[in-house]
Amino acid sequence: MAAAGYLAVDIGGTKLAAGVVAHDGELLTRGQVPTPPTGVWAALAGLVEEQVQGSPVGLASCGVGCGGPMEPGGERVSPLHIPEWRGFPLRRALAEATGLHTSVANDAQALILGETWCGAVAGCRDAVGAVVSTGVGGGIVSGGSLVTGRLGNAGHVGHVIVVPGGRRCACGANGCLEAHASGTAIRDATGRHPAEAPAELRRDVGALVGRGLVTVGALLDLRTAVVGGSVALGYGDDFFAAAQEEADRCAGLEFLRGFRVSPVGLGDRAPLVGAAAVARSATSV
């Protein structure tokens, strides 16, 4: 069978997902399971094996989006919301399990690669993407290339301080975007599932995300942002209207005016198409 697609893997604090994505970005198959409190690798390995065995096309390589922080290339990952994984050798484990060349990036880095490939900002060379879900992650494309940083952790918009002296974050700082806008933070603050948040809280969360994104825009000369993740997409219009209003309020510099915050174009396919984009990007270098 000729290689015609990518094995895509998305690893989050709430769910594990895997699928097969064609070379044109079409999601062909997918499966997911809740992220277990223990035995995460066993659950992921079983899910990945199902996708490999059932793939309708030959697989060229494997791409992975995973919460960080991590070492360069995902050689070892330590997602804040998967306590069992501290220094877990993710890239090697998946390469050995699948027999495929495997590339790993932060999940939000994967998202922005997917969105600039075949999503809401296809062809855009300068944009920031964010995932607002269990945690808050970010990724940046500048000049058509993914910004990776010294260890591959660039783009962590979730750890931009948006509320000075605010809530304690899992990273140890106070007032991080993740400490106020993530699903985990919302549950901790309200005692309820994030989906049950009232409209006022949904708008507050959106405003904080807009503030964090426009801050990144000022730092890196960007005017385009796309946002995905279960919290952002679940909150919908309330979230995105507030995010845009706050971005407009904060975008005082001339080069920032017109800063736009939009939902991902790939919807709930964004994590897996983004993971495939990680594999695609690695093979095109």
Image (tube, rainbow, N blue to C red):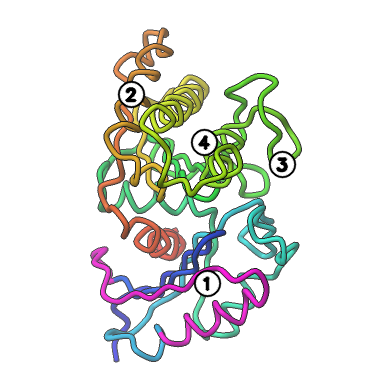
Please tell me which residue is depicted at 65% across the width and 27% down the height of the picture: 175
Spatial distance from mark 4 to mark 3, Cα to Cα? 14 Å
Which of the two labelled residues, at mark 4 and mark 3, occupies the earlier sequence position? 3
Marks 2/3 in contact by CB < 8 Å: the verdict is: no
Residue toward you, 83 or 189: 189
As helix, strand or loop, the secondary structure at mark 1 comes to strand
Mark 4 Cα shell of 10 Å, populated few (<14), some (14-19), many (≥20):
many
Please tell me which residue is depicted at 44% across the width and 30% down the height of the picture: 201
Q: Position of residue 68 (x, y in %)?
A: 62, 52
Spatial distance from mark 4 to mark 1, Cα to Cα? 31 Å
Which of the two labelled residues, at mark 2 and mark 4, occupies the earlier sequence position? 4
Spatial distance from mark 2 to mark 3, Cα to Cα? 27 Å
Which quadrant of the structure image shows residue 158? top right
Marks 4/3 in contact by CB < 8 Å: the verdict is: no
Query: In the image, is 199 to the left or to the right of 35?
Result: left
- Which residue is label 2 attached to? 244
> Which region of the structure is painted magenta?
22-50
Q: Is residue 126 magenta?
A: no
Image position of 277 with respect to 194: above or below: below
Front of the two marks 2 and 1: 2
Identify residue type, mark 3.
Cys
Which quarter of the image is occupied by the N terminus?
Answer: bottom left
Front of the two marks 4 and 3: 4
- Which residue is label 1 attached to? 102
- Which residue is label 4 attached to? 181
Mark 1 Cα shell of 10 Å, populated few (<14), some (14-19), many (≥20):
many
Please tell me which residue is depicted at 54% across the width and 77% down the height of the picture: 44
